[in-house]
Image (tube, rainbow, N blue to C red):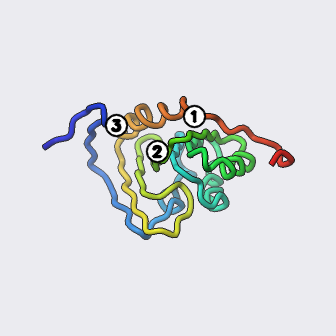
Amino acid sequence: MAFNDDNGGFMFACDDAKMSICASTWNTRLSQIGRATGPIFVMTGLLPDPDYISQIIGKRPRDFFIIANSDAEPEAQYLKRRYPNIRIVLHSKNNAKVVLVAPGTVWVSSSDFGKSDQIESAVGMHSEVLYKKTLDKLFNRVWVESREVQCRPMSDI
């Protein structure tokens, strides 16, 4: 039985995909982002180990957009102070774990964007259709419902 577009999601075809099991980290999956020219969109529940996340963002601290759960506000503030040109928003119900790297890479993972000591898995796909649909139907919809993190001075923390 084939999947169809409906209220629960959309169907897509993908000729190039990889199942990442236990050994791969976000740093490894995104090791080439310094060469990427388009934006990077991240959806995560928490932001575990912001120093680790800084190693990833530091490879290209521009055109980086993050949606995190409101529970990650302290870590989001830390990242925003360290990289004022990235944009981070918070949403009280976000728990999606998706990373989109333009023009057509999509990672869907069991782990939050950051460092994990748990057994995790992820699926990476190269599909411009999947990228565009996920950006439009998931990321952008949650983004507009979210509250943007502003860079606060250290004295306010």
Q: Is residue 132 left or right of residue 146?
A: left
The residue wearing badge 2 is 100
Mark seen at residue 129: 3
Residue 94's spot in the image, x, y percent?
50, 43
Q: How many marks?
A: 3
Front tag of 3 and 1: 1
Three-letter residue code for mark 2? Leu
Q: Residue at x 53, y 43 (%)?
A: 40
Mark 1: secondary structure: loop
The alpha-carbon separation of the residues under discs 2 and 3 comes to: 12 Å
Residue 151's spot in the image, x, y percent?
75, 41
Q: Residues within 10 Å of mark 1 (few under 14, many from 20)?
A: some
Three-letter residue code for mark 1? Ser
Q: Is residue 56 left or right of residue 14?
A: right
Image quadrant in which you'd find residue 8: top left
Mark 3: secondary structure: helix
The residue wearing badge 1 is 146
Residue 29's spot in the image, x, y percent?
47, 59
The alpha-carbon separation of the residues under discs 3 and 1 comes to: 25 Å
